Image: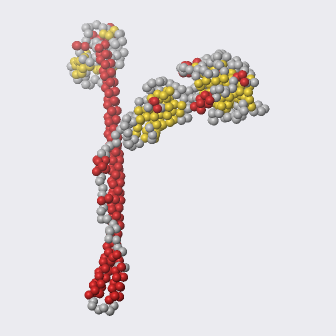
Amino acid sequence: MKSSLYGIRMYVSPTVREGSITHPRNRNISTQNPLLPHARYALRPKGVGGWCPSEDALHSAGSISTSSGVPINKKAADEGEIPAVFAARAAPVQLSGEMGDQKESLRKITHTLAMKNEEISNFVCTLKQSLDNLEANSSRVQEDLESEFTSLHSVLDEMKENMVTRIKQERASRTYELQSQLSACSKALESSEELLELANQTLCSSATDGFNQAAKDIKDSVTMAPAFRLSLKAKASDNMSHLMVDFSQERGMLQGLKFLPVPATPEIQVSECQVCDNTVTVVWTLPEPDSKIDHYILEHRRTNHEGPPRIREDYPWMVLEGIREMEHTLTGLRFDTRFMTFRVRACNKAVAGEFSEPVTLETHAFTFKLDAASSHQNLKVEDLSVEWDSCGGKIQDIRKEKTRTNSPMHSPARSALMSPKRAPTARPGRDRFTAESYTVLADTMIDAGQQYWEVRFDKESKAFAVGVALRSLGKFDQLGKSSASWCIHLNNWLQQSLTAKHNNKARTLDCAIPNTIGVYVNYDEGVLSFYNSKTKQLMHTFKTKFQQPIIPAFMVWNGSFSVLTGLQVPSLVQSGQRKNSGTSSSNASLT
């Protein structure tokens, strides 16, 4: 049998089994022999008795080499390691580098072909699925079409039946009126004819006796005759033109029936959108009115990047469906990102249109975290919540935190915000406040603008305070007892009291204690105000001049509180500030 492998001719016996070669002396030579590591020898037939290497594959007499580079010479053959005839004349065909390159190229082509086959197979499956979907969708829309036409036919049949019924009723009513009038006239005519005949007979009579009486009776009968009480005007008209119809306009509308078009793309009107009081009102329009619009779908997403949406965003799209009007207001939002992106699309009964161009609105609000690295060891700080822990719950975490950054204020994500600025820690230790200063600060300082946040606290706390402090506040300083802090202080120890404190001076506040306190800061004007967050009633205002950036500060003893950030300055607070700008209390008034 003749074969060719990469351009090298081979003559292989059909009787040669894989793994052995038959020697002319009927000895089996294993192709796995270390001295013959490859079975790729060019062989040619030599008589009937066996097989030997071909002339084209033999080197000159001498040594031959295996693939491992070990020489095989005639001496090795004499020692019986290989047959002499092979040692003398046989040499293995060396695998050239070109052959290896061709095999590698063939492998690559084979791999590419396999990938292409898999791609085509997947595409074939997709086409089959598309055909199945096409059949199902076609049947569905055809059923919908037939249902709509059946409904339309039902409406037309019902309208036709109602209109025919009205015509019949009108005809019956008029027929009754006319027939009644006809009957009355016929009877009156008959009575008149009888009286007329009687009158003629009386006139023709020559007898004078009783003439006067007969004439009087006839005269009375004529006077009371029905003919003189009848109206000779028809009570009903025979004209039925008021029940005529002209459906040419409706026919034109029916002829204009067509498949539902894809709704046009809305356009968000940025100038009419509003962002205030943690609500966003989005307004959009259509290029032209479309009575087929059933509803709108509005999607919004938080982002810290201005401009068009990026391919990969940190937050997912939130979907609002079933909007009937061309505007929508989102309420109760927490603005923990700098912007919100909106897009909208219109939907009819059949299909949804394309999304509008995304619009990004700025959602400015004050956001911060509580700096656990500065809090007292008896305060258990979790995100924006703090709980009194008499056992000093932070001690167990100190060793873990030694391998971390000293303060979350150094977080790159937080340092990305412009202003308010993240405040670096004043001291490297975790337990900054100690002794009876059960204080925790925010991780963001205020150095400009108007800011607002709220704090919900346990009214059963033994002591609670909320306010602002300078970065220079000492670790032993209690809020309101130094010139570096301003606060409202709730005391439930022995007796309940609510006071405004600064520089170790206090003023008792005569107001109800709310569940949640709103804190307003106007850094540029030096205003710090506290409000009942529910009613927006002003509780107290400090008026000063901040010489340094300030930081939200909190204190709690035997209690708990939680902070709400991402809030805009409420409109009621802003209007109240303008009203009370001349009547605010000051630091000097604290005694």
* Residue placed most toward the observer, 340 or 384: 340
- Residue at image point 36% right, 15% down: 34
Residue 83 visible? The answer is no
- Residue at image point 70% right, 35% down: 512
In the rendered structure, the answer to whether residue 539 lies left or right of residue 144 reads right
Instruction: Give residue 70's position: percent from left, percent from top.
Output: 35, 10
* Residue placed most toward the observer, 129 or 470: 470
- Residue at image point 57% right, 29% down: 568
Quarter location, residue 587:
top right
Residue 329 visible? The answer is yes
Instruction: Determine whether 249 is above or below 383 in the image.
Output: below
Instruction: Give residue 588's position: percent from left, percent from top.
Output: 72, 22
* Residue placed most toward the observer, 5 or 277: 277
Instruction: Determine whether 453 is above or below 54 in the image.
Output: below
The quarter of the rendered structure image containing the N terminus is: top left
Instruction: Give residue 393's position: percent from left, percent from top.
Output: 68, 26
The quarter of the rendered structure image containing the C terminus is: top right
In the rendered structure, the answer to whether residue 299 lies left or right of residue 7 reads right
